[in-house]
Amino acid sequence: MGVIGLLSFVQNVCPSACVTVDLKEMAKEYQEANPGCTPTIVVDAMCCLRYWYTLNSWVQGGQWLEYVSHLKDFIDCFRAAGIKLVFIFDGVVEQKKRPAWVKRRLNDNKKIAKIFRFLKANRRQPGRAMFFIPSGLSTFSRFALKSLGQEVFCSKQEADYEVAAYGLQNKCMGILGEDTDYLIFNTVPYFSISNLKLNQLVTVTFSREILCDTLGLGMTDLPLFACLVCNDTIPEDMFRAFQRKCMSSDHPKIQSYNKKGNMFFAVANFISNIPPSHRSLEMLERLLPVESDMTLLRTEIESYVLPEQESPWLSPKMPQSQAIGDEQEKAMYSDKEILQMAMEQHFRGENFMICNILCKRETECSNTLEDEDDSGLSSQALIYCPLRQHIYALLLGTEKDSSGACPTVKEWYVYPGNPLTQPDIIQAVDLDIPGGTPSLRTLWLTKGPEIQEQRYYVYLACFHVENSVKEFQALDGPIAVVCCLLVYLLLQVHSLSLEDLNAFVAQTLCLQGKSVNQLKHLQLSEVNSRAVHLGFLFIRGIITSMGVNSACGFPFQMDDLMPWKMFDGRLFHQKYLKAHRRCSAEELLEGNVSLLTQFNHLKSLICAVCTSRSRTIESKPRGYMFLPENLVRQDPYFSKPHRSHLNPPFHYQGRRHQRRGSHSSGFRSQHFGRGHSGRRFQPTSR
């Protein structure tokens, strides 16, 4: 993130800009200088995820109760020093960052494939060098921090801009993160999360002043410098010829350092020798390649200029900051009251995926630890697509336009075979319930117990379990959420077996009585690649359920949908291994007889709903889990044809994915078209 190579430049060329600081002492000095004010650090939460998730286990789906405990310890250390933390999360992927986002996702696909090769060869978790952040970590971290009483915001634009602006406008003690853009913004001090020693509250701060002295630049020159040496938005080849021309000069510092360092000095020398004005910027734009976007340089400089700041490099007639504009005016959704409510919830971090769909009709999902070579399990992006289509129907309606098409959403979802060259165009699909899909105004703005009942009914209808309302209402919130999700998965994924169901239900029930310490010391005999895939498939299901809950007007409290209430990766893995060895229910439940009745009841409920939808749940052949991969592929269980009446396929129609018909029994994608080329992707055959 930020300016490519700048951190190593600062550390190696101007190490005096890296200053070790004691945050406890800084807090005392802050209070002395600002009586009555609480020392506050604004945290770029996305930069901190790797620092926060240091648990030994990461490949099984996430150790969520342990993770929340770690977050509490993190907060407590700052609280003990009298320091308040404010957390800001990314709320959008801006279009200018989409190419960088896509590049990272495609690189992550290669890393994930390597992880699964390791799992199959070694049957154990890879070392930390292959660490991959558990799916949903940023989403769940938001809600975990809120549950711990922290102030949490979700950005309406690029998060680093909002972090820098918040710190400056609220006179914060500093910014905690790991992004060299914080060296470019003219804002409060920047503290490194990767160098933080939590117990001592000691870290490193990077001095903009020393960086400027080293480069011979003024503070207001740094945004132009960041653009000319290339940040994560400016393409590296855009200024390559310009950089070479600068390096051909005979500046005395050139040739003293490595190639990147020499380039930084050469560009800084060029900037220091031209007058800081918008006319100089126009001259620079004329040096760009003919095919370049001539507005990009100005836009990027502007993106570093915080509210109430000015840049000498920009025309006075141009806006001097990237302050948050009126998003409602740009939004594609016409009901401003609904939109205002969605945006306020988004900013407070209270809903999931809603605002981007209403405002931009666009959504994205990053990589998941899933095995693209497992022919029995499709990608989560495809499995949950029908569920997302119902979310889109709730948010956008299903009224057809003049061409006869339902509202659509652009999806940037990662799955095997998707090059991410453009988004999938996904149509909203009506709910198959009396009266059709209710309006968003009804679900969000109407009050009273009757409407809460309707919200609950609509939530269940998204998972095709609306005929069992009374049975689900009798369950605790988290248990009901799990049962909805398991029914949906069993209807969508026909390779799921009775053993898989036993493992999911047993781990959910056993989790209720586990302490953090007990979960931490769970022992696994081995790591199974299919169980890893299933664990993350379940986690992505929880996240999608959060979107359903948000769209329905919160029939469940969001706290009921948190993974630490219903899932632990190691515990599930342990139950999966035992279930596929045909252990008894008593052994799966660890001898807890009091759980046996509930275990049987939940299984009966789930199986009854699936049977009513024409899906019989069977056991796998004994020893299935331990067959070599090539033999598993020959197992007749995998070649069993899917019932076509259960799975009406998507069909290609002008770069749109549209479901044929409307079946209450559930459906799945058998052909997922890639619009522009007409290429079809068959997830069940991979």
Image (cartoon, rainbow, N blue to C red):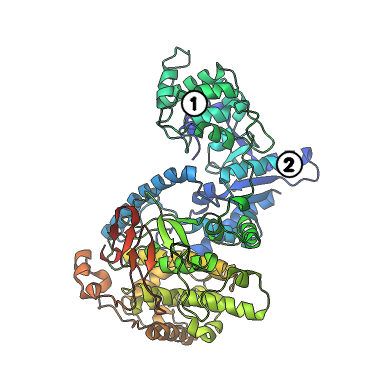
Question: Could you tell me residue 437's position as x and y percent?
Answer: 52, 74
Q: Residues within 10 Å of mark 2 (few under 14, many from 20)?
A: some
Quadrant that contains the C terminus: bottom left
373 shown above or below 213: below
Instruction: Tell me the CA gap for discs 2 and 1.
Output: 47 Å
28 relative to 17 in the view: left or right? right
666 relative to 458 in the view: left or right? left
Foreground pick, 634 / 580: 634
165 shown above or below 294: below
Classify mark 1: helix, strand or loop.
helix
583 relative to 622 in the view: left or right? right
Amino acid type of the residue tagged 1 in the rendering = Glu
Q: Residues within 10 Å of mark 1 (few under 14, many from 20)?
A: some
Can residue 402 be seen from the camera position used here? yes
Res. 28 mark: 2
Residue under numbered circle 1:
285
Question: Could you tell me residue 399's position as x and y percent?
Answer: 50, 68
Q: Earlier in the sequence, mark 2 or mark 1?
A: 2
Residue most extreme to the right:
35
672 shown above or below 182: below
Foreground pick, 289 / 110: 289
| Residue under the image location 65 percent in, 61 percent down | 341
Q: Nearer the viewer, mark 2 or mark 1?
A: 1
Quadrant position of residue 583: bottom left
Question: Could you tell me residue 113's position as x and y percent?
Answer: 31, 54
Residue most extreme to the front:
402
Question: Could you tell me residue 300's position as x and y percent?
Answer: 54, 35
